[in-house]
Image (tube, rainbow, N blue to C red):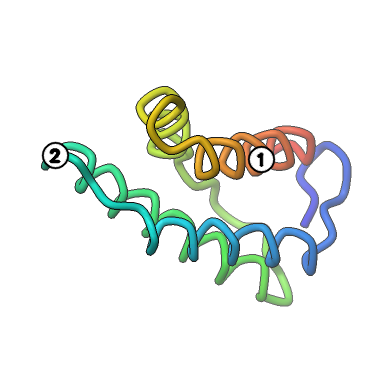
Amino acid sequence: MQRGGQPVENKDLHKLLTEIHEEINLTQAVDDDEGTLLRDIEKDINELLKRSSARNPEGEAISLHSLEQAVSRFEVTHTTLTAQITKLLDILSGSGI
C-alpha cells in the first residue's frame, strides 16, 4: 500500500490492524458515546483490513476521523488501544493516506 509516501508492508499493516481489532473487542465502553466511537473505529479497521488484503489496496480514501477522535478520547482510559491507533495513524500518514 503506497500513496505518495513510504510504502507500507501489507503484512505489517494487517498485523497491526488485527491487534487493534482484538484490543477493541477487549475494550469496555463506559458510556454510549464511547460505544459509538468504538463501533466507528471497528468499521474503519474492518475497511482497512479489507484494503490491506486486496491486490490493489489503493482506491478512494477513507476517513480517519474516528481513529483521530479515539486517540483523544481514550488516551487516559485505554492506553494500549490509544498507542496502537497512534501507531496506525503514523503509518498511514507516512504512506500518504
Judge whether 68 appears above or below 10 on screen.
above
Foreground: disc 1 or disc 2: 2
- Please, which residue is most extreme toward the right here? 6
Q: Is residue 58 left or right of residue 10?
A: left
Q: Which label is found at residue 97?
A: 1
Q: Residues within 10 Å of mark 1 (few under 14, many from 20)?
A: some
Taking the spot 54% from the left edge, 46% from the top edge, the residue there is 61
Label ID, residue 31? 2
For badge 1, the amino acid type reads Ile
Query: Which residue: 51% across, 35% down?
Result: 79
Residue at 31% in and 49% down: 38
Residue 39, above or below 61: below
- Amino acid found under the numbered disc labelled 2: Asp
Of the numbered discs 1 and 2, the one sitting upstream in the chain is 2
* Left or right of 54 in this view: 81: left
- Percent from the top left, x then y, of residue 74? 39, 31
Q: Residues within 10 Å of mark 2 (few under 14, many from 20)?
A: few
Q: Nearer the viewer, residue 65 or 84?
A: 84
Residue 94 sits in quarter: top right
The percent coordinates of residue 41 (x first, y second) are 39, 49
Residue 14 x/y as whole percent: 68, 66
